Amino acid sequence: MKVLVTGGAGFVGSHTVEALQRQGDEVLVVDDLSSGDFGWVPDELVVRADVRSPQAARAVEDFRPDAMVLLAAQMSVKVSMRDPLLDADVNVVGLVAMLEAGLRGGCGRFAFASSGGTIYGDVPAAQQPVTEDHPHAPRSFYGITKSVAVSYLETYARERGVETVALALGNVYGPRQNPWGEAGVVAIFAERAVQGLTCTVNGDGLSTRDYVHVDDVADAFARATRRGTGLVNVGTGIGTSVLEIHDHVVRAAGRPDLAPVLGPPLPGEVRAVALDPSRAASELGWRPTVTVADGVPGVVDWVGGRVRAAVPGVR
């Protein structure tokens, strides 16, 4: 099977490429490398292009994929609140450009990365873990684009006769997550902790997210190239607080003495998220396998290696 992955040189994308290759797929990556890394996928698999560009569209049309995994995105809530125009341009216009290119290239199936952490908004505790039929009420511009994208996919399926599935992801973490970026609290905390530096927790630290390991997410996308339709939550069903994540990270870094510093809450952030993964089991045959306790040490090890290579004196 031929599968094209946009954003395939990035954090989630590179793991997804590996999962696709393990199931025997022929893979092509389209990535502008704004956040990805050539070292994570073989050079010969990568077309360097922005998904909004004619070059990206031409790569899709020439490759003629059976399925596309659409991961390229502006992925920071903070950036979206600063620059909603950029956020919409990449996350909506870029998505539609790739859907249209896919249609011209004969693609019959599209799997998209939506955001279970933002599209549902603030959900009362009694309604968590949240299911896919919960109304969308995003609080950030990023969440709006990820919700609108689900509607685009549903409409393309209905009006263009293609198969589409949108995976509403929890907070993805794991090796290759950027520790110097604007999103990805596990890697950001790890980068500080391995240097013996304190971490800033925005708000009171009691807000919760559904943290799902990148290996499990890559497995879900590989499955989604074959099966599943509509909106599908990809999470664990368990909410973990930011303070709990901090505790896991500093212990894995061997620095349990490091106490967090509380900072102001971030605009656009929701209070609590846990995603019901039941539909993923029925639609994709997927279940999470990596717990936070098991997954965080691997991130700390990976980030530690990056930090030691970049920062003199860190052991």
Image (tube, grey):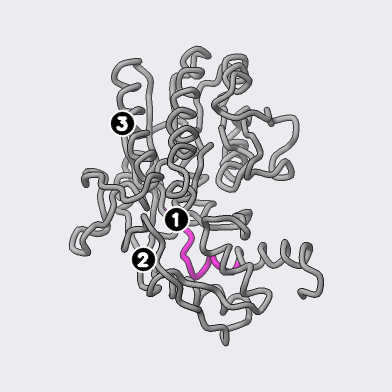
Check the image and report above or below for 281 versus 229: below
Q: Quadrant of the C terminus?
A: bottom right
The magenta stretch is 288-297
Residue 208, which numbered label? 2
Q: Callout 1, which amino acid?
A: Asn
Q: Is residue 241 above or below residue 181?
A: below
Residue 219, image x, y percentages = 50, 45
Element type where label 2 sits in the image: strand
Left or right: where 120 falls relative to 146: left
Residue at 34%, 16% in the rendered image: 161
Residue type highlighted by circle 3: Ser
Image quarter of the N terminus: top right
Mark 1 lies on residue = 171
Q: Within 10 Å of the Cα at label 1, are there few (<14), some (14-19), or many (20+) other Cα atoms?
A: many
Q: Pick whichever, 130 or 66, lies toward us.
A: 130
Mark 1 secondary-structure assignment: strand
